[in-house]
Image (cartoon, grey):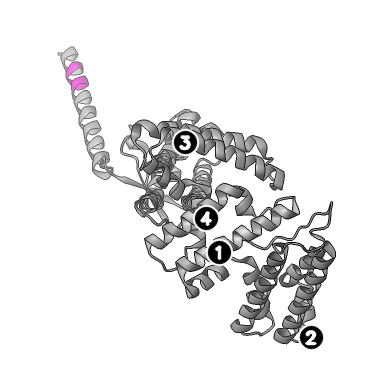
Amino acid sequence: MKKLSLGLLGLLIFISGVLVSRFYMASNQTQQPPDRQVLIPEETNRRNIRIQTNRFMWREIESAEYPRYVINLRNIGCPEPTVEDIIVADVNSYCLEKTKPTLHALQEAVNRYYASTRPTNSIAQVLVETETVLNRNDSERIALIVHLLGHDVDKSKVAIAPWDYLVREAKSSNFPYVSIERRTKVVELRDQLQRDMRALTRPGHGINAAAAKQLDALDQQFYKKLADILTPEEMEAFMLHDSVVGGNVARKLEKIQLGEDQYIQVFDAWKAFTEKYGELQTAIGFAPEDPQQQTTELSDELALQAKIKDILGDQSYSDYLRNNDPQFWNDTSFATQNGLSTDQAAKLYDLRRTAMQAIVALGNTPNLSAEERSSQVAVIISTAQNQLSSVLGQQLQSAYLNGPSGGWLNVLKGTGQMWSPGTKTEFYPSNP
């Protein structure tokens, strides 16, 4: 009887323990449903960040505050590398959601760029703007991870941002006008060109005229290889959307109202000019070393501008010149700083171009000795100075000539010797 009583007592104790355990587990499940979201308070701006943690098995130790959740993980003996993995994964998920609107905007910009016969912006500029946002978001991502863990984390765990694959996906939209079987080859050629160009340049250093000439030679080799694998239509689309000259023309015409036919005509004119004188040399504004070649290029440039003027019309061409000429920016800045009118700024700009055109015309005049050319250059300079005095007055003229706006006239004074044997000149008007 005594043995029976002890056995019955043990059974009752066991049953009671099971019931208590079941009640406790049911209570915990009621308080912490599987789809519960955990709040992460940010001390910097007090905004709440919601991150899903329903995949974890440690539900019984989760709390309403995410930092406490991290402490609880450590308190139960969760290895620190595992804690780091959990926190990095959660923060990555949150930051990816935060970044998706930027990535969507990037994809839309890429689609618009290639869908238009007239690109309104360089795709490179869109990528730069996107990278600025993504770099800021990535810094915030890493800072949040460090804040939650209380210490730095191994770089290998945070080196790859969670949106990297989406950026690659958007960039892979490049060359959508090329058939899929040839697209890979185009990417390979482009990547090889970029590697070859990097080998010729030094980070943090500018590009001189010799380097620009070498880079243009690489560019031409690239176009020849490209023409061998693309159809004429695909090659035309590449030049329009993905070449250096295509990007430059898109920038130059961005603020000009014109139709697609006009855009293509201007693009074709610029393309022909850069094929002769080099994309980079033209874009940067390097002059040929030989004075006579300088004169020839300037003459071709004036012919190019005359053609563009015929395409755009007088008013649009005037806007085109002013929007793209740094000298006009300088003239406008000088006028604003000195209380001058927009009309006076335009007169400064026009008299500069008139003087430069006169110099080019003089260079193309045959049967003149160096002395005769030098004498006529002096007349051109004197005329320009008198016009400056008429627009600005003596006091402002002095300020203009001694500032960045009047630098062109100081350079112009050296052109009287530009045709003398054995001499070189730095005279080269800006390329709108």
Q: Magenta segment, which residues?
A: 7-11
Q: Looking at the image, tell me whether mark 3 or mark 2 is earlier in sequence order.
A: 3
Which residue in the structure is indicated by mark 2?
394
Vertical relation: 409 (above or below) 292: below
**Residue 226, numbered circle:** 3
Q: Residue at x 22, y 32 (%)?
A: 22
**Residue 305, numbered circle:** 1
Q: Please indicate, yes or no, whether residue 432 appears anywhere in the rendered image.
A: no
Provide the secondary structure element on which disc 4 rests. Answer: helix
- Tell me: 71 left or right of 277: left
Hey, what amino acid is under mark 2?
Gln
Provide the secondary structure element on which disc 2 rests. Answer: helix
Q: Looking at the image, tell me whether mark 1 or mark 2 is earlier in sequence order.
A: 1
Q: Residue at x 40, y 54 (%)?
A: 48
Report the Cα–Cα distance between label 2 and label 4.
40 Å
Q: Position of residue 280 (x, y in %)?
A: 61, 48
**Nearer the observer, 280 or 76:** 280
Give the number of the mark in front: 3 or 2. Answer: 3
**Residue 270, numbered circle:** 4
- Tell me: 170 left or right of 203: left
Q: Looking at the image, tell me whether mark 2 or mark 4 is earlier in sequence order.
A: 4
Vertical relation: 31 (above or below) 13: below
- Tell me: 391 left or right of 130: right
Give the number of the mark in front: 1 or 2. Answer: 1
